[in-house]
Amino acid sequence: MKSLFSCQIIFGRSLYLILIFLSSHLRADEGKTPRNIDMAKYRERVVQMFQHAYDSYLKYAYPYDELRPLSCDGQDTWGSYSLTLVDALDTLIIMGNHSEFRRIAQMLIDRSEDFFDMDINASVFETNIRVVGGLISAHLLSHKADMVLEPGWPCSGPLLRMAEVIARKLLPAFDTPTGMPYGTVNLRHGVPKGETTVTCTAGVGTFLVEFGALSRLTGDPIFEKVAMRALRTLWDIRSQIGMVGNHVDVGEGKWTAIDSGIGGGIDSYFEYLAKGAVMFQIPELLEMFKEYEATVEKYLKRDDWYMWANMKKGGITLPVFTSLDCYWPGVQGMIGSVEKGMKTLHNYHQVWKQFGFTPEYYNIPKSEVHQGREGYPLRPELIESAMYLYQATRDPYILEIGIDILEAIEHSARTPCGYATVKDVRYHRLEDRMESFFLAETTKYLYLLFDENNFIHNQGNHGKVIKTPSGECVIDTGGYIFNTEAHPVDVAAIHCCSAQKASEDAELQEFHDNLNLLELLDITEVKESLIEGKKLKQKVKVMPKQKVEAMKVVIEADSNDEEVEDAKEVVSDVSSQVADDGRVNVKVTYKTVDTTDHKDKSVENSRNESSEIGPSVPEVSSKSKSENPNMLKLEEKTTNNYRKKHSLHLAAKLLEIFTGLTGGSDKNISEHPNINHLYREMKDYELNYTYVPSMMKCQALPFHMRLSVMGEMFDDS
């Protein structure tokens, strides 16, 4: 058994509800299966559905992107890199098919050298959520399939390197005046000549889960920086009533389509604000989401339906429900609005029962399919929300929704070569396409709905301690975050590789080595001889620029010791300069102030501190001492005060580490000709995450377990 030091003080009711939801503590009738529903039976039927579609893809379509289930062949759609195979990798693990996962993962790894070296145009949005997200998830879950892991796993590995390679090929899209990305890149040459500057809102705001994970796994902050800059730009250009449109010009930052809703074109932007807030503990994003949620409730909601409105005036423009709206009840449950989510889910289910599927657009007042949008391309959003809300409520009604979806797809969409898109939900005519998300999302969410004991649903009562070159980490503790393509990310494994954890480990160790509670609390006097051999040595390490100001505050606080009544040494100036090697040299100028006669008698002492752990004791010339007798008093008290201040300083530094983000320093500028400018531009971009000072956290634990002040126990096996 291993004990973990962890604690977190929750910074608001909204995040508290998120933690509770993700830990499944809102569950009613915990552990009870509803009567008359054979969960194992339906779980097995989902496995058979997945296997039929998966085998058909391998037999008829591989290495093309997608299967054509009526023609029994394949086609390239989003990039010509065997998209369905990459998208389905983590589903194999979730369904327990470890041997097939190992086979396919190794096949991809063997082709990795030139896997993405193609002169083709690819969707930035789709490539990110399907390929980058799929590879990151497969990398983090590979240990469950007994893959042979590199010594540096989870911070290195061939699947992670593949994700990094393709993500770097997407970076040129972000080199725009606004920071919002183009919609298309050429995988070899960057943004195509003449590429339109207009893209959808979701195509701008759906990168943080994947890019944030990639930055913390690889140590290169460029990915997280460009994703956050894009999110903040969208926030800055919202309308005066707090709404966003569904298409925007990324060159000028102007809206080109002003219809606002929760569905297609906007959907995953809202989703990633909520998930990014939880995954990376960023209150800024939660505040954005909550403000958007209030605006949605005010202008878009009508009787538990959500319509489309003018982003500038708020008037309803399209009284329709779209199939992509179905993700919203799941997000409502995630932020604690379970009752609202259940009501909305019920409405959407009624549409499904009316047609056997949900059409792309449904006219709410007329209760009919919107002309020209009659299809159902095997979308996962309805079953996604059902899975989330079932985990929150254990309401057997939600299982009935899952059964309805399973039966309808099996009855009307199955073909000898897979499962086909429903071209018209009124007549159940089929179209010759099976998108990759059917294996990545639809079948995965169905399986997880009927598999109550899947490792994904871990409530945090067990975890796994692993040893890495950077120390021990705890993984598999639950609290997985799904990207918008249903690729689960183990947040604890992400934290294991982050610069934040490295700093936490170092500060904890130093705090342990140097803290003397008896002396700190003035309980006893510690003899100088007992600590002579334990004085803290000066250390040199790289200090992130965002800590310079924090250090200034600490030094200023340390310099104003209340016990020195007549004379004290204060900081007169703190300046910093970034050296060529990336270090931040801090120059601290001290002066001695005689408070007896209110005359400034200052002696300046400058020194460069790359990142001294504690405040050094400044040296004062003998001439200054003779001129100011109070300096002798200051010198006599320096030793005792220094030890106390040093302990306090360590505590302050520890709190700073726990409540702030310690990002890795920028890597050398890439040689790729299309991203040199982007690297230079983003080098000085500050994330400046705002953390509530009282919130302490340990990312190695699932969210609900961070409520514990004492920490939890984990089985080392």
Image: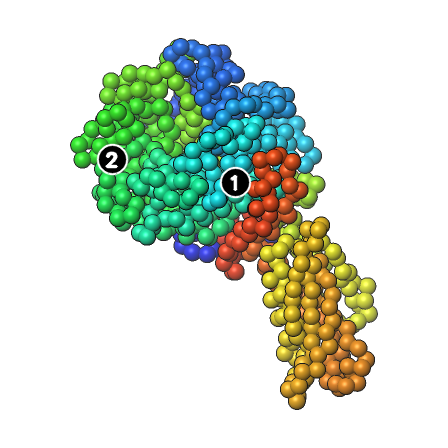
Placement of 299 over or under 164, stated as above or below: below
Residue that mark 2 sits on: 320
Question: Residue 266 in the image: x percent, y percent?
Answer: 37, 39
Placement of 445 over or under 7, stated as above or below: above
For the residue labelled by badge 2, is the local secondary structure a helix, a strand or a loop? Answer: strand
Residue 208 got which mark?
A: none
Residue 76 located left or right of residue 111: left
For the residue labelled by badge 1, is the local secondary structure a helix, a strand or a loop? Answer: loop
Question: Residue 344 in the image: x percent, y percent?
Answer: 28, 39
Q: Quadrant of the C terminus?
A: top right
The residue lying at 17 percent from left, 32 percent from top is 366
Crowding at mark 2 (Cα within 10 Å: few <14, some 14-19, many 20+): many
Residue situated furthest front in the rendering = 194
Residue that mark 1 sits on: 175
Question: Residue 402 in the image: x percent, y percent?
Answer: 34, 28
The residue lying at 44 percent from left, 47 percent from top is 233
Placement of 676 over or under 512, stated as above or below: above
Residue 462 occupies quadrant = top right
Residue 83 located left or right of residue 619: left
Q: How is the image coloured?
A: rainbow
Residue 301 vs residue 636, the one in the foreground:
301
Q: Is residue 55 visible?
A: no
Residue 59 vs residue 707, the one in the foreground:
59
Q: Quadrant of the N terminus?
A: top right
| Amino acid at the residue labelled 2 | Val
The residue lying at 30 percent from left, 45 percent from top is 311
Residue 201 vs residue 332, the one in the foreground:
201
Residue situated furthest left in the rendering = 366
